[in-house]
Image (tube, coloured by chain):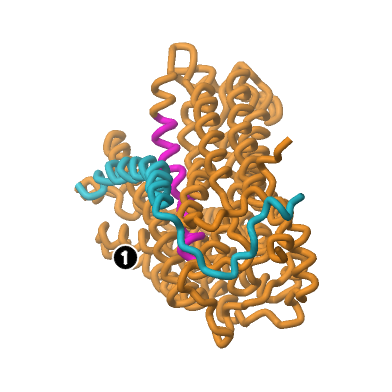
Chain colours: A cyan, B orange
């Protein structure tokens, strides 16, 4: 059963499709925006150290 | 019924883009990283009954009676046990379930981690609602701790297989997420608690429910985003390093054989010493800043003991900002050092951590005596980059020494070094400090000896790293063993087709 589901061995290098880069951008935005917000808040609170 | 979690279903199609895996790993690590930010709940939870002020338990109640009492508030020291549970269960579950993870694949492990972490928060919410601390310990501490361990190691071997050319960078990005989770979770929790706070509630149980659901969904998205490369996959234009690079093996060591090697225990020592010293410094940095500089932080020429109530509050605010800055550098170090290790090698990277670390730890008291706050802050920020870098580079070091077949599971076993360090570091720091103060040393000077002791821990780590040699050939898996293991891990069919 499993033989049919699994793609063949990929000895050769393969290039991702162009459309996949769009997905990559969205995926990174989904994790990057909250992380960026967290870093912004931390930096904002740290400003008091440099006053 | 179609098994959505089956490992076979996670094998990527030829057009798959490997850069989709790190955000999936980050979604999980950013969620479980909130464990570091749990201290935001301590103060509101210590007023869960009194709402506006603490309702202390009667003095004549014994410890157990105070635990089960539902008409008085919990002490912060009682709540703090959660951290011990987190790190003990993180290390234990990663060690115990690592092999299972390699067999069933990262998706199933990620889903179980989501259920444990999200579900654990829901159980904790019930614990807060009915004021039963044992439910908090069980929910977030034990069940959530298991979720931490599984979630932490779930992407490691997958990322290393997708990024054989950038092992350090790939795992470093994910592990940076664990450090960054509290940066998102802690301010979000504060906002939620403010939103839910009412005359009858401090807003914690409602926040636990909300965060539990958010983390559950985010971790499920991450788990379903995981894909495994087909067997033999390699990035375009990349060739495996030539065999003359003896510190990167092309062979694999079985999980059960790895602890029999000297290399496993040397790496255990490397991680344990780096983390013990780092945890010690994290625990000391903020009080050290306050006690060494005192009024200088607010441009008043007085020691901490001579400051007024408001001035002490202002100094504490600056110290809190310092702690936040340290956590940011901890994360940056995870990405920077692990990425750099891809170019300069893991052994040299740890050589830098330990040599520079010893110099910086030993010069911290001097920096304090010089009276330059900026120098002191910069020094600790740099130390923290190496603490984070030590965490983030270890999976790639393991893959170099033991191969990729069991790297996730071996990493899981190695995380017991973290659990050990979680106890060793703080105990060592507190004991030495108390001993110094009892001998009559002023508070601000009691840190000096501690810093030297922490530097000596780094010397032990330095020695372990220096002794690292490639694993002896007799420990490598044979072709037959590898084939058999891949069959059990549902990989062999892909390899033979």
Q: Is residue B4 left or right of residue B394?
A: right
Residue B423, how many percent across, how many down?
61, 53
Q: Quadrant of the N terminus of chain B?
A: top right
Q: Residue at x 66, y 28 (%)?
A: B135
Quick check: can you spot residue B437? no
Identify the image quadrant of residue B477: bottom right
Query: Which residue has dot 1 on it?
Result: B367
- The question of residue B178 being in magenta is answered with yes
Name the chain letter of the residue that bears numbered label 1. Answer: B
Q: Residue at x 70, y 76 (%)?
A: B262
Residue B371, how many percent across, how many down?
26, 60
Q: Residue at x 51, y 77 (%)?
A: B239
Quick check: can you spot residue B21? yes
Magenta span dominant secondary structure = helix
Residue closest to the far top = B199
Identify the image quadrant of residue B70: top right
User: Magenta part of the protein: which range?
Assistant: B168-190
B140 or B339: which is nearer to us? Answer: B339
Q: How many numbered circles are shown?
A: 1
Tag 1 secondary structure: helix
């Amino acid at each position: 059963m499993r033989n049919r589901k699994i793609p063949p061995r990929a000895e050769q290098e393969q290039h991702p499709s162009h459309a996949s880069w769009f997905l990559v951008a969205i995926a990174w935005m989904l994790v990057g925006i909250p992380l960026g917000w967290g870093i912004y808040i931390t930096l904002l609170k740290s400003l008091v150290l440099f006053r | 019924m179609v098994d959505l979690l089956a490992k076979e279903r996670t094998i990527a199609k030829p057009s798959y883009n490997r850069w989709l895996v790190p955000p999936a790993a980050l979604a999980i690590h950013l969620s479980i990283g909130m464990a570091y930010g749990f201290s935001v709940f301590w103060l509101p939870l210590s007023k869960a009954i009194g709402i506006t002020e603490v309702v202390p338990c009667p003095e004549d109640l014994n410890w157990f009676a105070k635990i089960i009492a539902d008409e008085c508030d919990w002490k912060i020291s009682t709540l703090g046990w959660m951290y011990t549970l987190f790190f003990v269960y993180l290390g234990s579950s990663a060690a115990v379930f690592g092999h299972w993870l390699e067999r069933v694949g990262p998706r199933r492990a990620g889903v179980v981690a989501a259920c444990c972490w999200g579900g654990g928060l829901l159980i904790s919410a019930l614990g807060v609602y009915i004021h039963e601390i044992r439910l908090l310990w069980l929910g977030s501490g034990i069940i959530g701790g298991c979720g931490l361990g599984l979630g932490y190691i779930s992407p490691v071997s997958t990322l290393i297989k997708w990024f054989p050319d950038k092992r350090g960078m790939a795992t470093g990005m994910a592990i940076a997420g664990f450090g960054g989770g509290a940066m998102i979770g802690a301010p979000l929790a504060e906002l939620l608690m403010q939103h839910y706070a009412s005359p009858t509630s401090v807003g914690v149980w409602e926040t636990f429910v909300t965060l539990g659901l958010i983390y559950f969904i985010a971790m499920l998205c991450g788990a379903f985003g995981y894909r495994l490369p087909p067997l033999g996959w390699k990035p375009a234009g990349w060739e495996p390093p030539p065999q003359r690079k003896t510190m990167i093996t092309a062979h694999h060591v079985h999980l059960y054989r790895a602890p029999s090697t000297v290399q496993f225990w040397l790496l255990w020592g490397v991680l344990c010493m780096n983390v013990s010293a780092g945890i010690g410094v994290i625990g000391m940095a903020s009080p050290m800043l306050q006690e060494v500089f005192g009024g200088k932080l607010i441009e008043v020429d007085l020691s901490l003991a001579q400051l007024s109530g408001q001035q002490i509050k202002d100094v504490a605010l600056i110290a809190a900002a310092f702690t936040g800055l340290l956590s940011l550098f901890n994360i940056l170090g995870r990405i920077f050092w692990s990425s750099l290790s891809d170019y300069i090698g893991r052994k040299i990277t740890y050589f830098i951590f330990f040599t520079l670390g010893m110099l910086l730890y030993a010069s911290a008291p001097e920096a304090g005596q010089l009276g330059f706050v900026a120098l002191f802050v910069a020094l600790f920020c740099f130390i923290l980059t190496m603490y984070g870098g030590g965490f983030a580079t270890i999976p790639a070091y393991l893959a170099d020494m033991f191969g990729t077949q069991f790297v996730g599971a071996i990493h899981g076993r190695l995380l017991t070094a973290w659990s050990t360090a979680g106890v060793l570091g703080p105990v060592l720091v507190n004991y030495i400090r108390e001993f110094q103060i009892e001998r009559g040393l002023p508070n601000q000077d009691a840190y000096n000896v501690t810093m030297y002791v922490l530097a000596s821990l780094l010397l032990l780590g330095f020695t372990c790293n220096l002794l690292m040699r490639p694993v002896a050939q007799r420990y490598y898996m044979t072709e037959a063993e590898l084939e058999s293991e891949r069959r059990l891990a549902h990989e062999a069919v892909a390899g033979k087709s």
